[in-house]
């Protein structure tokens, strides 16, 4: 019962600011509304017993990515751009596409039989994640670090002012 | 009533479709990137939820989610750098005005 209440609260904390993110005409307000969305997702991770993923989510999404987005808004909009029209002319079509996809996916979810959980998660998942990253998923780990390096260099080169 | 896999999947579907709507309807390239972040978060909820409810013995769903978070950070960095470059050259971040290649 308490789990269900916590889930409902966290789902609302996730989804209500997400609506603000996609509909607000003030781009800074939309970017700031990302923070409660990411923190709500963090709560869902904790509810799913994924503490390590939750911590990383707070550090990277709520911390780094939001600040990066706010920086770019401040550097590009010439202030906040409140008076600028934010919606594209294809907004009704976009709404239709998103609503159709949501209806389709919810229908599929309603008609599918999902597996019952067999067994339980390990008590501390962080140790198992580390072991997996350094044994069976070591190739994924190394390739991810390579992608990080390449995107770091690429972002610097793209954003650098040519002279 | 227990919280099951279906509950998390419903939240994930709604979050994904909100992100899709932002990508399809926003003019500002930064807002489009915010929509992409919402969609990536929705997939991460899916991965972690399936990890708990379908294969709890292995932590591969959480490992996958961590890789997705890393790649999302890369994508945000490169994407925002591209927005900066476009703004420097074209003086706009609105995607309906960036139409140099449109015939």
Image (spheres, rainbow, N blue to C red):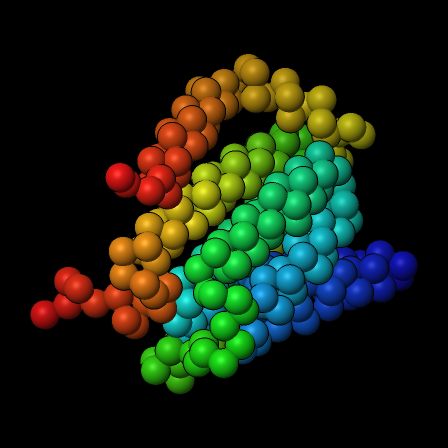
For residue B58, side relative to residue A105 (left or right)? right
Q: What x and y, as percent, mark residue A42?
A: 71, 49
Residue extending furthest top?
A: A135
Identify the image quadrant of the N terminus of chain A. bottom right
For residue A88, side relative to residue A5 (left or right)? left
- The image quarter containing residue A163 is top left
User: Can the viewer see residue A62?
Assistant: yes
Residue extending furthest front?
A: A163
Tally the marks: 0
Q: Name the residue rendered at 28%, 71% in the picture.
A: B97
Q: What x and y, as percent, mark residue A135?
A: 55, 15
For residue B15, side relative to residue A56 (left or right)? left
B23 or A111: which is nearer to us?
Answer: B23
Residue B62, compared with residue B23, is above or below; it is above
User: Can the viewer see residue B43?
Assistant: no
Q: Name the residue rendered at 54%, 69% in the picture.
A: A80
Q: Name the residue rendered at 21%, 67% in the picture.
A: B99
Q: What x and y, as percent, mark residue A123?
A: 80, 30
Residue B83, compared with residue B61, is above or below; it is below
- The image quarter containing residue B27 is bottom left
Residue extending furthest left?
A: B103
Residue extending furthest right?
A: A2
A34 or A125: which is nearer to us?
Answer: A34
Q: Name the residue rendered at 76%, 61% in the picture.
A: A10
For residue A62, side relative to residue B80 (left or right)? right
Residue A38, compared with residue B29, is above or below; it is above
- The image quarter containing residue B103 is bottom left
Residue A116, compared with residue B8, is above or below; it is above
């Amino acid at each position: 019962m308490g789990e269900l209440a916590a889930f409902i609260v966290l789902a609302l904390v996730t989804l209500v600011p997400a609506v603000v993110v996609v509909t607000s005409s003030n781009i800074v307000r939309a970017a700031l509304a990302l923070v409660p969305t990411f923190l709500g997702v963090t709560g869902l991770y904790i509810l799913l017993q994924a503490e390590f993923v939750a911590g990383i989510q707070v550090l990277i999404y709520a911390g780094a990515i939001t600040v990066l987005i706010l920086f770019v808004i401040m550097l590009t909009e010439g202030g906040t751009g409140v008076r600028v029209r934010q919606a594209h002319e294809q907004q009704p079509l976009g709404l239709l596409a998103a609503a159709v996809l949501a209806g389709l996916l919810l229908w599929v979810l309603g008609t599918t039989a999902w597996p019952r959980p067999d067994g339980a998660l390990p008590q501390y998942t962080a140790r198992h994640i580390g072991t997996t990253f350094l044994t069976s998923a070591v190739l994924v780990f190394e390739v991810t670090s390579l992608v990080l390096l390449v995107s770091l260099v690429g972002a610097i080169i793209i954003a650098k002012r040519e002279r | 009533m227990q919280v099951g896999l279906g509950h998390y999947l419903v939240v994930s579907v709604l979050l994904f479709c909100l992100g899709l709507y932002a990508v399809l309807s926003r003019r500002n390239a930064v807002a489009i990137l915010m929509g992409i972040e919402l969609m990536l978060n929705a997939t991460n909820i899916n991965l972690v939820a399936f990890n708990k409810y379908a294969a709890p013995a292995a932590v591969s769903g959480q490992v996958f989610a961590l890789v997705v978070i890393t790649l999302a950070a890369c994508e945000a960095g490169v994407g925002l750098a591209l927005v900066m470059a476009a703004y420097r050259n074209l003086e706009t971040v609105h995607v309906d005005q960036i139409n140099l290649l449109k015939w």
